[in-house]
Image (tube, rainbow, N blue to C red):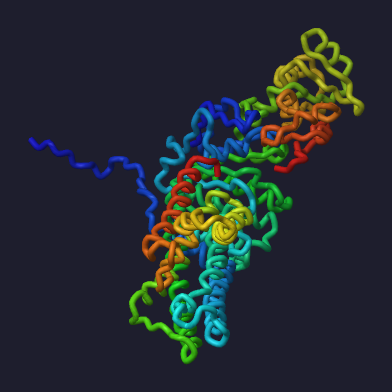
């Protein structure tokens, strides 16, 4: 369980995190979404007791981080990949961290096995790929077998195989009843990994909901209908509040009526249906819509660039607006990096 | 009748795992120190610089033409003269002990594992201080015996039994260990390897050089106040004019290191990692 209450963090004139309150509950994967520079990493650092909030507080399992007696047994975190001394082996990196909390060395071998680094654990970590670095970071988080876990962009630098591995690991950890809090700016990945969502933009809470509800609430969803009786169905729908557009392939895109009511209507009228399928707006689209006002800079706005500050709150640089387009946008990649 | 309450065997008890023990953090710091190559390199350079340069200076004194005549020679100091170079190598290690964690980002893992940051710093002080003292002590005795062997036959030599000699040899190791801790304090304050080494070298080498250009009355004060000149008395057998005595001078050096470390602990606890 993680609780944030009125968390506020200011870097100079930039408000990186602005009166942010939320709860992350155990048993599910909770996604922490926002464009780069929205304040996700800052929030996670405040939860982990690394950065001090200017206002508000964060607790893990009901306690402030500094009050945790042996923190690695309470919460584990992957905050940045490759935060490792390049000259030290993966084994020794984990060993020195385990020793601080009195964790037995045998556990180091266990977590190395869990993340698949056993064979390379004696090699100097400087030669590790980004993906191996992420795995080592995850191993660090798991050392104390904690009930609460935080992962900041764990998929960064991983190949598709690695991303699938992370997703399955996160879901398995949540299924064991743990609190799993994962930040990402990759919407499509969150859609299949997380159940709960906390969405922030410019340090402020935009949504605290389930993934399903997040998509449902956003406009853009419709029901696709295929029927040989398209004309009659359109007429019937037109009498109510619903409307139906004929798509290029001849199917109907119906809005303004629940899918169940639509099916019942067709049955009542004896209309044969070949397809009746809900077409949800993608998480991407829902996200774009919600964060439209909170993205600081969008492409095509000359002159705005001068307002870019050095703090992370303004890390959305100019020129990346093209990545926030309505179609095909996989990520809100910042030009200044994660 | 009885007022005592016996805890029920079935009462739910939250698993209290207690707190982090200081010895655990020390064990961790020992692992960190022994598992990177820079530790071995800097300690090796420390020993070679100490013994090699001391031997060279003793050879120059024995076979060269020392100014002022043999009665002005302090044979113990000559055989420990490499300290001035050894301190640079050891200082680099002292800085790296903390700045390598900042430059790699490891410090956030460390401070997540041990939220009481002063405890981490104290463990680094203990472990690094003990290691650098042990290595320096070995180097000091080797350097002393090698130096006396080179001096023998040409100029007066010193023996361990003579007054002040053991104090000077052990003092050289103490001096190096505390210089290393001063570097650790500077590294913690500055957090960047290059910046911390620059300040360290400036404090130990550049500022004392600049004082040569100053009036004698100012130099008298600075020689008693600067860490290298004040601390240097602890490995000199002959008392030096205008300088503090061995332990008073060492005390000044310790005060520098303590000030840097306490300031570093206070600031590190307050600022974002």
Q: Is residue A88 left or right of residue A60?
A: right
Q: Is residue B265 above or below residue A222?
A: below
| Residue B140 seen in the figure | yes
Give the quarter of the image for residue A218.
top right
Please give the name of the residue rendered at 54% of the width and 55% of the height, measured from the top-left corner: B215
| Residue A136 seen in the figure | no
Q: Quadrant of the C terminus of chain B?
A: top right
Q: Nearer the viewer, residue B64 or A288?
A: B64
Residue lying at the far top of the rendered structure = A239
Q: Position of residue B42 (x, y in %)?
A: 57, 69
Give the quarter of the image for residue B96.
bottom right
Q: Position of residue A74 (x, y in %)?
A: 45, 45
Q: Is residue A304 left or right of residue A147?
A: right
Please give the name of the residue rendered at 58% of the width and 51% of the height, measured from the top-left corner: B191
Count how many numbered circles sit on residues in the image: 0
Please give the name of the residue rendered at 10% of the width and 37% of the height, measured from the top-left corner: B2
Q: Nearer the viewer, residue B246 or A294?
A: B246
Q: Position of residue A59 (x, y in %)?
A: 47, 35
Q: Is residue B4 above or below residue A244?
A: below
Q: Nearer the viewer, residue B18 or A224?
A: B18
Residue lying at the far bottom of the rendered structure = B153
Q: Position of residue A62 (x, y in %)?
A: 43, 35
Q: Nearer the viewer, residue A174 or B231?
A: B231
């Amino acid at each position: 369980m993680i609780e944030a209450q009125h968390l506020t963090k200011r870097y100079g004139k930039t408000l990186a995190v602005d009166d942010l309150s939320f709860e992350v509950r155990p048993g599910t994967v909770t996604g922490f979404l926002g464009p780069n520079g929205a304040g996700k990493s800052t929030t996670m650092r405040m939860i982990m007791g690394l950065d001090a909030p200017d206002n508000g507080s964060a607790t893990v399992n009901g306690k402030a981080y500094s009050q945790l007696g042996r923190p690695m047994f309470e919460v584990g975190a992957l905050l940045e990949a490759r935060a490792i001394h390049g000259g030290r082996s993966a084994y020794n990196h984990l060993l020195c961290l385990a020793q601080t909390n009195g964790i037995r060395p045998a556990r180091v071998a266990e977590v190395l096995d869990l993340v698949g680094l056993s064979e390379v654990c004696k090699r100097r970590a400087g030669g590790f790929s980004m993906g191996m670095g992420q795995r080592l970071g995850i191993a660090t988080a798991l050392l104390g077998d904690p009930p609460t876990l935080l992962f900041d962009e764990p998929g960064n630098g991983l190949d598709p195989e690695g991303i699938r591995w992370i997703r399955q690991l996160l879901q398995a950890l949540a299924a064991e009843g743990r609190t799993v809090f994962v930040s990402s700016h990759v919407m499509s990945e969150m859609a299949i990994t997380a159940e709960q969502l906390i969405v922030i933009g410019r340090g402020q809470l935009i949504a605290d909901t389930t993934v399903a509800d997040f998509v449902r609430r956003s406009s853009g969803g419709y029901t696709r209908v295929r029927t040989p009786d398209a004309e009659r169905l359109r007429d019937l729908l037109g009498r109510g509040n619903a409307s139906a557009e004929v798509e290029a392939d001849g199917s109907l895109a119906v809005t303004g009526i629940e899918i169940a009511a639509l099916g019942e209507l067709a049955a009542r009228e004896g209309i044969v249906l070949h397809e009746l399928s809900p077409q949800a707006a993608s998480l991407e689209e829902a996200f774009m819509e919600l964060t439209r006002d909170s993205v600081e800079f969008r492409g095509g706005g000359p002159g705005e660039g001068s307002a870019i500050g050095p703090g992370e709150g303004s890390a959305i640089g100019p020129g990346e607006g093209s990545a926030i387009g309505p179609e095909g946008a996989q990520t809100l990649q910042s030009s200044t990096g994660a | 009748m009885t007022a005592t309450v016996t805890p029920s065997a079935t009462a739910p008890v939250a698993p209290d795992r207690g707190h982090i023990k200081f010895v655990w953090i020390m064990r961790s710091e020992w692992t960190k120190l022994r598992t990177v190559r820079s530790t071995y390199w800097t300690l090796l350079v420390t020993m070679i610089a100490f013994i090699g340069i001391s031997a060279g200076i003793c050879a120059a004194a024995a076979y060269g033409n020392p100014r002022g005549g043999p009665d002005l020679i302090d044979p113990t100091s000559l055989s420990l003269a490499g300290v001035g170079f050894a301190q640079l190598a050891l200082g680099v290690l002292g800085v790296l002990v903390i700045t390598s964690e900042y430059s790699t980002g490891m410090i956030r893992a460390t401070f997540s594992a041990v939220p009481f940051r002063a405890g981490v710093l104290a463990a680094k002080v203990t472990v690094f201080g003990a290691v650098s003292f042990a290595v320096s002590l070995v180097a000091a005795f080797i350097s002393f015996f090698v130096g006396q062997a080179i001096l023998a036959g040409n100029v007066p030599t010193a023996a361990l039994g003579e007054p002040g000699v053991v104090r000077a040899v052990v003092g050289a190791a103490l001096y190096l260990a505390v210089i290393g801790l001063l570097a650790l304090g500077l590294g913690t304050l500055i957090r960047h390897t290059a910046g911390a080494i620059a300040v360290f070298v400036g404090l130990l080498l550049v500022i004392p050089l600049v004082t040569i250009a100053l009036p004698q009355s100012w130099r008298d004060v600075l020689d008693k106040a600067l860490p290298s000149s004040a601390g240097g008395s602890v490995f000199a057998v002959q008392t030096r004019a205008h300088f503090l005595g061995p332990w008073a001078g060492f005390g000044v050096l310790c005060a520098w290191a303590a000030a840097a470390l306490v300031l570093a602990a206070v600031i590190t606890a307050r600022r974002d990692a």
